[in-house]
Image (cartoon, rainbow, N blue to C red):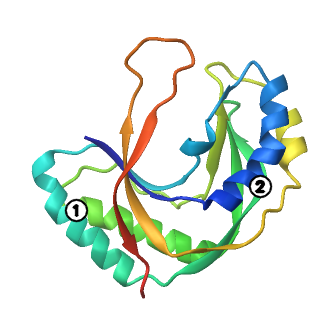
């Protein structure tokens, strides 16, 4: 099962971001735009996880959530990764979000899941991708001043990613929350 740990923006934040992203998506045909229901902040990507590791992973993620306090967050600014991914950043409780990302990564490792080399977490929500290097400057210029309203992050989610299998061009992965834990630290 292909899994990652995430913070999911509430419907109000998604709607607020959609108002500025959707007009760009209608004109930016060289990019593959992520559907609104796919918007999330990945904290730790685990890839394919063997079924027998899930009970330990769930227990460790529950402990990580118990040790982490709820925090305020808002969508803020924009950037891109090498012309391949256009993203929206975050502001607010970034230190707590980084701590939660570190704890999610550690929970996965201690559960026996091989993780890529650990690096400092950069909060980002991907809104579009390009197979080739696209000029993202017009999009980052348009989205760079975006300032969303604050919301309270009160949960962390374990999400299953189902990759496209139909071969239909432009088909996107589907995400399904398989477990959630409240932040109670």
Q: Position of residue 149 (x, y in %)?
A: 77, 68
Question: Which image quarter: residue 90?
Answer: bottom right
Q: Position of residue 77 (x, y in %)?
A: 79, 55
Quadrant location of the C terminus in the rendered image:
bottom left
Find the distance from the CA under tag 1 to the CA under tag 2.
33 Å
Is the residue 176 above or below the residue 149 in the image?
Answer: above
Residue neighbourhood size for the residue with mark 2, other residues' Cα within 10 Å, grouped as few (<14), some (14–19), many (≥20):
some
Q: Is residue 101 visible?
A: yes
Q: Which residue is located at x 81 percent, y 46 percent?
A: 19
Seen as rendered, the residue at the extreme left is: 52
Q: Which residue is located at x 63 percent, y 53 percent?
A: 124
Left or right: residue 36 versus residue 47 is right
Q: Position of residue 139 (x, y in %)?
A: 83, 37
Question: Which image quarter: residue 106?
Answer: bottom left
Q: Which residue is mark 2?
A: 16
Q: Position of residue 12 (x, y in %)?
A: 69, 61
Identify which residue, 84 or 22, lies in the foreground.
22
Q: Is residue 136 visible?
A: no
Q: Which residue is located at x 85 percent, y 51 percent?
A: 144
Assess whether mark 2 and mark 1 are in contact (beta carbons under 8 angstroms).
no
Question: Residue 9: which numbered mark, if any?
Answer: none
Left or right: residue 15 versus residue 44 is right
Q: Which residue is located at x 45 percent, y 65 percent?
A: 101
Residue neighbourhood size for the residue with mark 1, other residues' Cα within 10 Å, grouped as few (<14), some (14–19), many (≥20):
many
């Amino acid at each position: 099962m292909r899994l990652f740990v995430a913070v999911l923006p509430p419907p109000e934040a998604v709607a607020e971001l959609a108002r500025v992203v959707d007009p760009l998506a209608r004109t930016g045909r060289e990019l593959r735009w992520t559907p609104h229901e796919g918007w999330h902040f990945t904290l730790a990507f685990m890839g394919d996880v063997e079924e027998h590791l899930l009970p330990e992973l769930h227990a460790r993620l529950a402990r990580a959530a118990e040790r982490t306090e709820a925090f305020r967050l808002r969508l803020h600014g924009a950037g891109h990764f090498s012309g391949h991914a256009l993203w929206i950043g975050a502001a607010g409780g970034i230190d707590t979000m980084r701590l939660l990302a570190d704890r999610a990564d550690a929970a996965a490792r201690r559960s026996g899941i091989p993780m890529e080399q650990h690096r400092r977490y950069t909060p980002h929500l991907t809104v579009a991708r390009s197979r080739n290097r696209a000029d993202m400057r017009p999009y980052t210029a348009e989205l760079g001043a975006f300032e969303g309203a604050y919301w309270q992050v009160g949960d962390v989610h374990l999400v299953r990613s189902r990759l496209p299998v139909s071969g239909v061009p432009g088909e996107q992965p589907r995400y399904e929350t398989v477990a959630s834990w409240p932040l109670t630290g």
